[in-house]
């Protein structure tokens, strides 16, 4: 109980502190952080002036190091808060000798606790519910139900004991006997394989190592949890029988955050509709993020486009030229037209067909004046040669003398 209450307090504090920051996921490198801060500061200043609210500071996360394990969130702890309330209600009902209402509250608490096994420490919560269920069942003279609940509690949380101040002497004695039998009872072996690499197996919140694993536990009810990077955790209530059981193969579902992040990477250079859809899916899958940002550039020139998308959509690409942010309309959004205009601007210098200056250390055969002089020499030499050489006759005159004309 104290563990969960502590987790609740920590989660509330972390949530309060985190709400003061805007968490921006940057698809890029740390060298682009200064420009990203300039873009966000300019956009935040305009929004604060228009909406009359103070801009929140931004905290950048590089996509190369994301998505991290989100850990325990307040949403994960919500069922355990309900369990706490149901336990308190069941104790009040039992104190008023209304065992029926108490058992109904405990049945709901039992369901919620077993469904929250993905939260580390939830197995101890399940054990606490089972102990209270055993005490209430014994008070209602339902000793079989009390013994079953005590047996489950003994396997889920072995260090826990029912104390004298928590129940009658008869129930405490029954609990001691059940816990002692559970600690020395028959064992079962459960071989486990997982489709995901680096999958870690937890039984009753005890780390049993990486899969594949042959888990040996006391026969009875146990809490199983499997975690792997990039996958959703698997949790289940399992019944382990005596002896070696058939091998269990588990397929873990992909983490939607990982799939959404990969979709955004593929959409960075896509059309406006694809960009808007992919970024919206990522922000929905990762509610701790407030915005997504990246840069697009033409490597041959000094122009860049900055893209920013949040839960309200994507703004028109902001333009950088030689490191300076260019002015843009305050309410411009990302549309096919604004995206086409921005990318035309990005490639504008190449569209003009501007000649690139040759570097000073280029070899002589890449210099323009060498080839120009060579062309002049060739043309001049050809002209001089044409003038100097006499033209060859194209027609010949032939004279024939008749001997009769010489008389």
Image: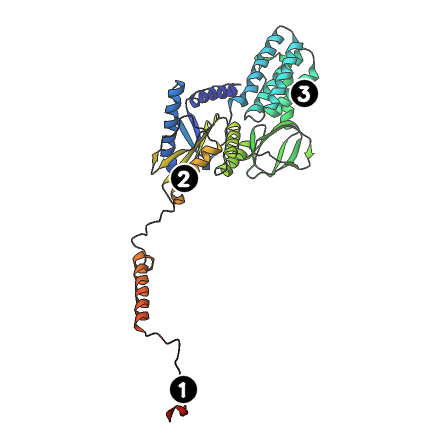
Q: Residues within 10 Å of mark 1 (few under 14, many from 20)?
A: few
Instruction: Report the mark closest to the observer, 2 or 1.
Output: 1
Residue 384 at what x, y percent from top left?
Answer: 30, 69
Q: Nearer the viewer, residue 126 or 354?
A: 354
Label for residue 376?
Answer: none
Instruction: Decide if residue 85 is on the left or right side of residue 295.
Output: right
Q: Nearer the viewer, mark 3 or mark 2?
A: 2
Pick the residue in front: 233 or 325.
Answer: 325
At 43% from the left and 39% from the top, the residue drawn is 344
- CA gap between label 3 and label 2 equals 72 Å
The label shown at residue 400 is 1
The local crowd at label 3, few if under 14, some if 14 to 19, many if 20 or more residues have their Cα within 10 Å, is some
- Residue that carries the numbered disc 3 in the rendered image: 148
Tell me the SS state at disc 1: loop
Q: Of discs 3 and 1, which sits in the foreground?
A: 1
Q: In which quadrant of the rendered view does residue 28 lie? A: top left
Residue holding disc 2: 346
Asked whether 172 or 287 is in front, the reply is 287
Relative to 30, say whether 291 is above or below: above
Q: Earlier in the sequence, mark 2 or mark 1?
A: 2
- Between the residue at mark 2 and the residue at mark 1, the CA separation in whole angstroms equals 84 Å
Q: Which comes before the other along the chain, label 3 or label 2?
A: 3
């Amino acid at each position: 109980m104290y563990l969960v209450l502590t987790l609740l307090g920590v989660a509330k504090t972390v949530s309060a502190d985190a709400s003061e920051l805007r968490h921006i996921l940057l698809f890029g490198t740390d060298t682009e952080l200064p420009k990203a801060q300039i873009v966000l500061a300019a956009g935040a200043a305009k929004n604060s002036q228009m909406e009359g609210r103070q801009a929140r500071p931004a905290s950048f996360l590089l996509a190369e190091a994301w998505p991290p394990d989100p850990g325990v969130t307040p949403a994960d702890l919500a069922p355990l808060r309900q369990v706490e309330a149901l336990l308190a209600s069941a104790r009040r009902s039992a104190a008023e000798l209304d065992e029926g209402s108490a058992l109904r509250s405990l049945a709901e608490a039992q369901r919620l606790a077993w469904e929250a096994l993905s939260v580390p420490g939830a197995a101890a919560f399940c054990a606490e519910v089972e102990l209270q269920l055993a005490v209430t069942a014994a008070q209602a003279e339902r000793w079989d139900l009390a013994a079953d609940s005590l047996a489950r509690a003994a396997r889920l949380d072995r260090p826990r004991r029912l104390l004298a101040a928590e129940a009658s002497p008869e129930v405490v004695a029954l609990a001691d006997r059940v816990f002692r039998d559970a600690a020395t009872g028959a064992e079962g072996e459960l071989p486990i394989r997982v489709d995901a690499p680096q999958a870690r197996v937890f039984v009753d919140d005890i780390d049993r190592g990486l899969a594949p694993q042959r888990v040996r536990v006391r026969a009875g009810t146990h809490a199983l949890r499997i975690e792997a990077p990039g996958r959703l955790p698997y949790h289940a209530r399992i019944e382990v029988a005596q002896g070696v059981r058939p091998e269990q193969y588990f397929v873990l579902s992909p983490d939607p955050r990982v799939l959404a992040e990969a979709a955004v990477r593929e959409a960075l250079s896509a059309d406006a509709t694809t960009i808007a859809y992919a970024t919206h899916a990522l922000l929905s899958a990762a509610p701790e993020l407030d915005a997504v940002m990246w840069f697009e550039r033409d490597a041959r020139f000094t122009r860049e486009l900055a893209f920013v998308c949040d839960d309200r959509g994507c703004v028109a690409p902001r333009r950088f030229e030689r490191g300076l942010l260019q002015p843009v309309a305050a309410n411009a959004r990302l549309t096919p037209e604004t995206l086409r205009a921005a990318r035309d601007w990005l490639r504008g210098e190449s569209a003009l067909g501007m000649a690139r200056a040759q570097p000073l250390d280029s070899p002589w055969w890449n210099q323009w004046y060498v080839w120009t002089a060579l062309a002049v020499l060739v043309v001049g030499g050809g002209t001089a040669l044409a003038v100097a050489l006499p033209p060859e006759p194209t027609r010949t005159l032939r004279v024939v003398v008749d001997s009769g004309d010489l008389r």
